[in-house]
Image (spheres, rainbow, N blue to C red):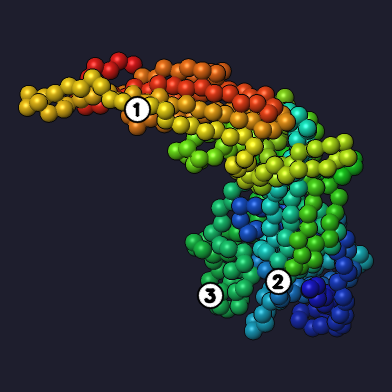
Amino acid sequence: MKRMITILTIMAMGGVCLGKVDLVTLPSRDTVQLTIYNSADLTLARESRALTLKEGVNLLQFSWENTLIDPTSLEMRPRANAGAIDVAELVYPPRVQNLGVWNVRSGISGQAPMEISYLTSGLSWRAFYMGTLTPDEKTMRLQGYVVVTNNSGEDYENAQVRLIVGQVHLLDEIAALARRQYPYDRPGMPLPSARAGGAAPVATMMRREMVQVDKLAAAPARAREVVKEGLSEYFLYTIEGTETIPTGWSKRLASFEADEVPVINLYKYEPQRYGDAVVRFLNFKNDTKHKLGQTPIPGGLLKVYRDVDDAGHLSYTGQASFKYIPVDQDVELNLGAVRDVVVEMKEMDFKSENYTFDYQRNISGWDELRTVEATVKNTRDVPAKIEIQHNLPTQYWDLTPGGDYDAYEKVDLDTVKFTLTLQPRSERKFSCVVRTYHGERQRNWRP
C-alpha cells in the first residue's frame, strides 16, 4: 500500500487573504533509508524527495493512514538552500485523523530537495547463518544472512537498509502512538513533552539517533557487502546497495561470508545433563585467528552442513541458536544428540566394607566400592574427541582409573572427566574404581 501525499501551494496576498491555491502531487521518493533495531519494534525512516515550491507559503499535506508511523516523530528539513526555506510548523487539523499539514515558507521558487524522517513500527530483522564443514571437519565456511520483514503498512522501494544491534529504552510503543485517534491524545489536552508515557521523548530520541547515525561513514562503492561500525552503545550493520521491501513481505539479504574458519568438534557424554546420549558441540572463536573478529556477531540460528564429495553434495549435521557474540569471545554451540559416536557405561561390581559402629552397635559409617567400565565407539570416517563427565553422589570419594584413555581430571567436588580421541571406526575401553565414604567414615577421608 502506498500513501497519498499532496502539496497545497498557497500564494499569500497579505494577512489571511489567499489569492491562489494549487494542488500538486508529491513526487516519488528519490531515496529512502531504513534503520531497523532488533531489540525493539522501532525503525527510523529517512526519505529524500524533490519538492516543487513556490515563493511564499506552501502547505504540505502528509497522511499516515493504514501505516504504523508515529505522527509525533515526523520531521522535515531542507537538504539545500536551508537559509531560504523555513519549515515553520506541523499542524494536525481538528476532527481529521491520520493527517498532518506542514507550513513551509520558501524564499525561492522551483525544486527543493527535502528530507522527511519519522519513526515507524512493523519492520523487523533477524539473523541466521549457514556453516559448511570441510570433509575433515577442521574448518568451516560461515555465511551470514538477515531476513527483513515489513509489516508496517508502507511499501519501501530501493531502500538502503541499516540494522542496529543494541538495547533501546522507550517510554512509548511506536505502534500504540501510530494508532492514536489524535497524535497528542484528545484536542485541547496539554502536550506530553515532559510527562511520563508521552510521545515527545520518543521523537527526541529519534533526533538523537539521527545525529549519531549521521556521524558514521557512508557506505563504500565496492561490490555489495555489509559495512559494520560501532555507534555509541549500539552496533550498526549497513547492507550495501538498495532493496525493495513491500509491506507484508520478507526478504533475505546476505550479511557476510568467512572461509576456512578453524573449528573444533567435541562430543560430550554427561547423563545427568544430556541423558543417555552423546551430544555434539562445535567450537570456534570470534577473533582474527579464526578469520573473524572484526565485529560482534548478532545472535541467530546456525545450521551446520558438511561437504561429502567433490560434487559439492552436503549432509546435514545439526543446528544451534546463540546469542550476541562479542569480539574475542569463545563460542560453543550445541548441535544436538548423535548416533555415530556411542558411549556405554556399565557397573561391573559393587561392594561395601569398612563398617563402623556406634556405642549401641548400630552401623555409623561404611565405604562403597563401584567398578565402572566404559566402552566408547566412533563409527564415523573422521576422528572424534570425546569428553565423558560423571557426577558422584557425594564429595567424599576416591577414584582409581584404568584402561585406555587419554586424560583424567577432577572438575569439582563431585565431578570427574575423562577425555579421549578415537580414530575413525574404532573402539576404546577404560574403567574406574570409585570408593565413596559414608557416615562416620567421612571423617577419615582425605582429598
Give the image quarter of residue 44: bottom right
Q: Residue at x 80, y 66 (%)?
A: 246
Disc 1 residue type (three-letter): Phe
Report the residue at 80% width, 62% height from top.
245
Q: Using residue 364 as the reference point, say whether residue 359 is left or right of it.
A: left
Q: Secondary structure at mark 1?
A: strand
Badge 3 amino acid:
Met
Q: Looking at the rendered structure, which numbered label has been put on residue 67?
A: 2
Label 1 sits on residue: 350
Q: Nearer the viewer, mark 1 or mark 2?
A: 1
Mark 3 or 2 closer to N-term? 2
Q: Is residue 428 above or below residue 48?
A: above
Three-letter code for the amino acid on which mark 2 is drawn:
Thr
Identify the residue at horizontal 60%, vertical 30% (top origin): 377
203 shown above or below 234: below
**Disc 3: which residue:** 189
The tag earlier along the polypeptide, 1 or 2, is 2
The mark that comes first in sequence, 3 or 1, is: 3
Task: Estimate the spatial distance between the alpha carbons at disc 3 and disc 1, rounded to whole Å.
Answer: 82 Å
Crowding around mark 1 (Cα neighbors within 10 Å: few <14, some 14 to 19, many 20+) is few
